[in-house]
Amino acid sequence: MKTDIAFFSKIIFLAGVTLLFISLFLDWYGIQVFDMNDTLISSWDYNVFSEWTTEFPEALSINDYYKPNDLKVPMILNILFIIVLGVSIYIILFRDIESSGNLKLQKNLSFIFLFLLMLIGFYIVVFPIMYLFPNYLYFPSITNFDFDLQTFQIFAISFGYILQLIGFVLVFPYALHYYLTANELGKAEQIPEVKIERYIKYTQTPLDIDKFIAEELENFDGVSA
């Protein structure tokens, strides 16, 4: 039963990683502008790789008017995120926490999962706070009426951001389990070594086996006499 739970938790984790990867190539945020006749006159979609794209000619004045500022999310974060996703898959498939005997390596690898959760947290939390709100991009969704131009604008998160949320929910349990388990096992392994090291450091006296045996023999002879 325990094996089945571990197996399914890994499947769920891998499904989450897949969604996280796909989300990077989908639109995360969208803006649509309609006139009073419900005709779409401007549309912009945001992706973390390609920034803002539109289905209208960019030279169209009304469409260009509603184009938001480039958010300039660091590209290195996107590349790093893909690398961490790949390493996470490798760990899940080939560095099983339940069967591997190299606890020191497992503890080091567990930080990959912690870093993965931090990166997802950046996309989910920091992205809206640092990149959307300062550019007056409403989150998660709102319809705004422009009285001057007689248009209404729809601001909304898109499927890429939603997949990022779902992916986080799927990877969080196993990622946290791996990190906590690896660190607890690492602490348990170090306890005997730490005790011995502290004892030697405290006494500052190396153990002399020959001297110890000689003293014991003298004590024994004294008792016999």
Image (tube, helix red, strand yellow):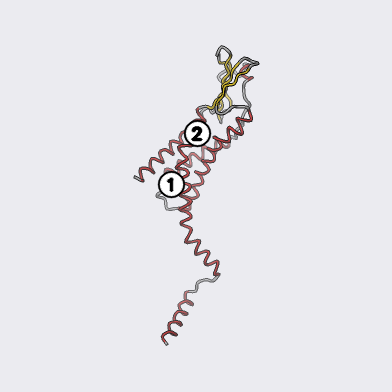
Query: Image quadrant for the C terminus?
Result: bottom left
Relative to 16, say whether 54 is above or below.
above
Of helix, strand and loop, which one carries label 1? Answer: loop
Relative to 31, say whether 100 is above or below.
below
Q: Name the residue carrying label 1.
A: 95
Residue at 58% in and 37% down:
76
Residue lying at the far top in this picture: please name it: 37
Residue lying at the far bottom in this picture: please name it: 225
Residue lying at the far right in this picture: please name it: 148
Tell me which amino acid carries mark 1: Arg
Of helix, strand and loop, which one carries label 2? Answer: helix
Query: Where's residue 203, x and y in %?
Result: 54, 70
- Mark 2, other Cα within 10 Å: few <14 / some 14–19 / many ≥20: some
Which of the 4 quarters of the picture holds residue 129?
A: top right
Query: Where's residue 102, x and y in %?
Result: 44, 53
Q: Name the residue carrying label 2.
A: 165
Query: Where's residue 58, x and y in %?
Result: 61, 19
Q: Nearer the viewer, residue 200 or 209?
A: 200
Residue at 60% in and 27% down:
137
Tell me which amino acid carries mark 2: Leu
Q: Nearer the viewer, residue 144 or 219?
A: 144
- Label at residue 174: none
Relative to 90, say whether 67 is above or below.
above
Query: Image quadrant for the N terminus?
Result: top left
Q: How many marks?
A: 2
Q: Nearer the viewer, residue 202 or 150?
A: 150
Query: Where's residue 176, x and y in %?
Result: 47, 44
